Image: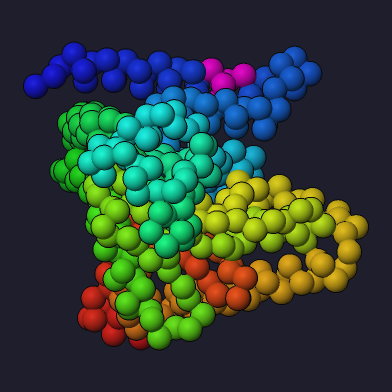
Amino acid sequence: ERPALVARRVAEISAAGLKALSLFLLGKLPTEEKGRSTAESAAGYKEIIEGLGPAFMKVAQTLSTRADLIGDAMAAELGTLQDRAKPFPSALALEIMRAELGGDPLAVFESIDEEPVAAASLGQVYRARLRDGGNQVAVKVQRPNVLGRIAVDIYVLRAALQLVKQVSGMSRDLRLIADEVGVGLFSELNYESEARNAEAFAEAHKNLGYVTVPKPLMELTSERMLTMEWIEGASPASLFLEMDGAEGGRHGAAAEGVGGLGAAATTTAIGTFRASGADADAREAARAKLRRMVDMGLACSLNQLLSSGVMHADPHPGNLLLTSDGKLAYVDFGLLTRVTPRHRRGML
C-alpha cells in the first residue's frame, strides 16, 4: 500500500550493503597500505548496522554472542548494542512516558535520571524513584516508531526471500523464515506481555532459592513503557574486570541488557586478565563469583528445560546479574518460550 516507503527502505538497505562491502574490500588490502585495523572495521560495521535501525540491531545483538562465527573484535563491537546503543533524546522518552501514563511522569516518579542507564535496539532504560514509597525502579521506554520500522523491514525481507525462492526454484516457502523473525520481534514490542513473562518466569522458578527476578509494576506498565523494581548486581563482564584488578563496580538492572558492561567487554577483559598482575586474592574472589554464576546458570537452565518448561529465551551476559546476596538475577523477558511436557520427557 506504500510503495514509496518500501522503495526508500530498499534503497537505504542497498546503500548500507555497499558501505559494508567497501569496508570488507578495504580490510583485504595490506595493512601498510590502508592501515585499517580489525577493531576499526568492526566499529564501521556497527555504525552501519545502527544506522539501519532496530531490526538489524537486534540481529546484531544475537550475533554478538557468537565470537566463534564473527571473531572477537566484531563480537565485542556488536555486543555494545546490548546496552550501549545510541540513545534517542530523553525529552522524547519523557513525552512517551507522558502519553503512556496519561499525565506528567513526575506526578508518579519523584525523580528520573536525565540520561538512560542503558540503550539497546528496541528501547532504553532510565533509573527513577517512586513518589509512593520512594523505591528505585527501572523504566524502559520503547524507541519511537519502532513498530513501523520493523514492519517495513519484515515486509522487505519476505519479498527478498520470495525472490530467492523463485530464482533458485526451491519448493520451500522461505517467507516463513521472515515470519518467524517477525513474530519474535513483534512479541518484544509489547511491554505488557514482557511484564507478564517476568511474572510467569518468577512463578515457575519460585522454589529455586538462588534465582531472583525483578518484579514488574503492572499499574505503571503499558505497551510502550515497562516499570520494574531496580536490582543491584554485577554483570559477568564487570566480574572479568574485577579479576583484572579494574574497578568492577555494581550495576543496577531491570530490562533489555541493563546490568553493567555487557558481553562486549567480556572479550577484552579476558585478554587483559591473562596478562594481569592484579592482587591474587581479589582475582580469586571474582573468579569464585563467576564460577558460582555459571553453576547457578547451568542449574537453572536445566530446570527450565527439563522441569518447569518456562525458558528465558535471551540469556546473554547483559541479561544476567550476580546480586550482592549471591543470587542469579534474570532480566529482560521480551523473549520467553515454553517446552511442552512431551518434549521434556523426550529429553529426559
> Most extreme residue toward the left, as rendered?
1
Task: Say whether residue 264 is magenta.
Answer: no
The residue at the point 25 percent across, 49 percent down is 222
| 221 and 239: which is toward the camera | 221
Q: Is residue 73 left or right of residue 321?
A: right
Classify residue 335 by image quadrant. Answer: bottom left
Is residue 322 positioned above or below 87 on the image? Answer: below
| 329 and 109: which is toward the camera | 109
Q: Is residue 66 left or right of residue 143?
A: right
Q: Main secondary structure of the magenta part?
A: helix
Any part of residue 256 in sight: no
Q: Position of residue 150 (x, y in %)?
A: 27, 34
Is residue 15 positioned above or below 228 on the image? Answer: above
Q: How is the image coloured?
A: rainbow
Dividing the image into 4 quarters, which one contains the C terminus?
Answer: bottom left
Q: Position of residue 174 (x, y in %)?
A: 21, 42
Any part of residue 2 in sight: yes
Q: Is residue 307 left or right of residue 321?
A: left
| 177 and 226: which is toward the camera | 226
Dividing the image into 4 quarters, which one contains the N terminus?
Answer: top left
Q: Position of residue 4 (x, y in %)?
A: 18, 13
The residue at the point 38 percent across, 81 percent down is 206
The residue at the point 34 percent across, 45 percent down is 107
The magenta region covers 22-26
